[in-house]
Amino acid sequence: MTLSPARSSRTMALLLLSALLAAMVASLHVGLRTYDPDTIWRGLTGGIETDEIIVRSLRLPRTLIAITAGASLALSGLIMQAATRNPLAEPGLLGTNAGAAFAVTVGLSVFGYSGLLQVGGFAILGALVTTAVVFALTLRLGPNAGRATILLVGVTIAAMLASLTQILLLVDETALETLLFWLSGGFADRDLRLLWLGCGLLGLVLVGLVAIAGSIDALQLDDASARGIGVDVMRTRMLALGAAALLAAGAVAMAGPVMFLGLVAPHMAMRLTRRRPAFLTLAGLTMLSGALVAVLADILARLIVAPGEAPIGAVLAIVGVPVLIALLRKRGARAA
Amino acid sequence: MMRLRTVSRLGLLTAAVVAGFVTSLALGSSLIPPGRVLAALFGEGARMDEVIVWTLRLPRVLLAILAGAALALAGALLQRVTRNPMAAPSILGITDGAALGVVSFLWVFSDEANRLTVSIHWQPLAAAIGAFGFALIAGGLTLADPRGRGPLRLILYGIALAALAKAAVTLVMIIGPVYRAGQALTWLTGTIGAAHWGDVAVVAAGLAVAAPVLAWLNLPLRQLALDPQTAAATGLPVGRTQIVLLAISVALTALAVSQVGAVGFVGLIAPHAARLVIGAFAPGYLVATALIGSLLVLGADTLARLIAAPLELPAGAITALIGAPLFLTLLIRRQGTHG
């Protein structure tokens, strides 16, 4: 039996969705203490026992944040990859996450903490500026620069911003206490109001994406052909990168800088479909994959070093680095 | 024959290291003027000054100087052997591999009360195992790359492996007994912190073994800068020389990292600075590299102590701030010439 591409994507979407639902349920169950379904149900429906409150106020938020941040980072990675035609692009590796984190740190140590809007605002500013700088630098590398070179620029900028952040934090002790936990990346114990910020940015970008999805599809050809069918290449690319930066900013504000999700999820989605589907379909599959990977990584983070908790970034690096190496080894694509 | 220019520049670098040495000894939570530092060094100072200088500051300053020299030499050798100006122990994942070796060692050989069950003297060996392991993987992946062995491929695999090693270090630290913030910082970004004379001796011994070997390999090192065929035509056993030099480089990295943690970018900056100061083929290039490395780590550590005193910044964060822009410049210039 052969499936048409559309049907195969739909089947895959359903599969991913059911896997995600299963992972969500597991995420409510598993942890330092494992709860039975009854407790969880009572917790979700307003129970007042300690266990039930833990489910509602700790496990549920972290699951929701994992889903939103995972979907945002995954989509951000996919958009960057499509806009630059570079399968290695990702907000973590290209420095966008580090830029957002650095801006939030600067904002907090200069102006003091004045609310979640401030965190969101600085994250957005940092993400946009860093993305612009990295891509401006890669333009200076000339049109023949390999994909790998762009990655190197991003990784270096990210390393620089990370050490600046570190110095700033140590110099400013009060900021250190507020931020150290957030900067280590993770989905647990986050402010739920940030979830609405992340959801809002994700929704906003999705609406915008529908408008430029056709142009992004056209970008997958070479620039000349895209121009030939009337696409403003530069404008599409700018809009797409801006959207990717916004998504990364939302995710960083929620969960701290998390690497590799934006790399792993789009490639997972592409592996699941046999032919590259239209951009919007791929975006849907990518978001589902990202949310699924994030929830699974979060569960893993609770289990591998129990009773402690592993930073989500470390868990994702252990999954993501093999993916990166496999991508680097893939034949056929233009070499560095 | 060394030319006068080379000699004078090496002399200047040495003077700078000596000046840095005295300055760094003088600075700290209590300022001791250089005159009193010198008096204390030669055993003629006040009792208090002698305690501060000899037991508190001197080991740390010497460790910074020696570790800087070791990391710088390791970088210069790597760049020669891989014929890649962007190679450096921290970029190829060797530094983080060594740090992983150390934290794994502390984890495996600790009992319930966080006491080591074996001697701490094995720690450099654990660092060496981690460093060699990651160097082998990065090299193996590059050699087996289906898309050719371009210089950027090695760097990319190295960066990927470094991320993996960093993640593993974090996890091992949480599982293991090293979960104390001060020590954790050492293994993540490199902090010289409280050094003991034993630490100094380990790195000094490594350098003492490496230096004569490198002096003896001076000619092969210059032959290696030619392309492989020409180098082989000059009678150099290319493969064997490369392996020996790589081994020295990895061992020096492991020794330095086992004592000061994952200080990055020194092996990248120092050889390039030495190239600017006296030229890559001048005799004394390696000496200049080592001196600049010492100066760099000493400067970074002194700054790290002072900027936010009484807090200490990781010296590795400061070397990264200098190293990252340099790496970008190299990358952009490379694209400009080889586009």
Image (tube, coloured by chain):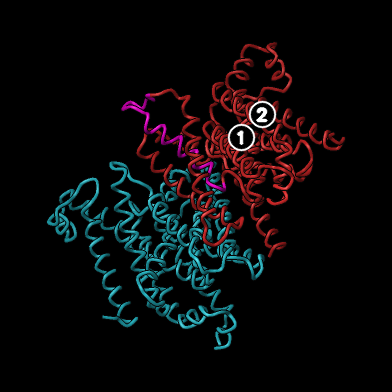
Chain colours: A cyan, B red
Image coordinates of residue A26 in percent, x first then y, are 22, 57
> What amino acid does circle 1 point to?
Asp
Establish whether labels 2 and 1 are both on one chain: yes
Q: Is residue A146 magenta?
A: no
Viewer-nearest residue: B40 or A91:
A91
Whether pointer 2 and pointer 1 mark residues with C-beta atoms closer than 8 Å, the reply is yes
- The residue at which mark 2 appears reads as B24
Viewer-nearest residue: B62 or A118:
B62
Image coordinates of residue B150 in percent, x first then y, are 60, 58
Q: Secondary structure at mark 2?
A: helix
Q: In 3D space, how far apart are the residues under numbered discs 2 and 1 (Cα atoms)?
A: 9 Å
Q: Of the numbered discs in the image, which one, if any, rests on residue B301?
A: 1
Disc tally is: 2
Q: Is residue A96 left or right of residue B219?
A: left
Viewer-nearest residue: B209 or A141:
B209
Identified at 46% across, 34% down, the residue is B102
Image coordinates of residue B163 in percent, x first then y, are 48, 50
Q: Is residue A305 left or right of residue B295?
A: left
Identified at 68% across, 54% down, the residue is B330
Image coordinates of residue B24 in percent, x first then y, are 66, 29
Residue B109 visible in the current orientation: yes
Q: Which quadrant of the figure has residue B119? A: top left
Q: Is residue B106 magenta?
A: yes
**Chain identity of mark 2:** B
Q: Secondary structure at mark 1?
A: helix
> What amino acid does circle 2 point to?
Ser
Residue segment shown in magenta: B91-117
Above or below: residue B8 compared with residue B140: above
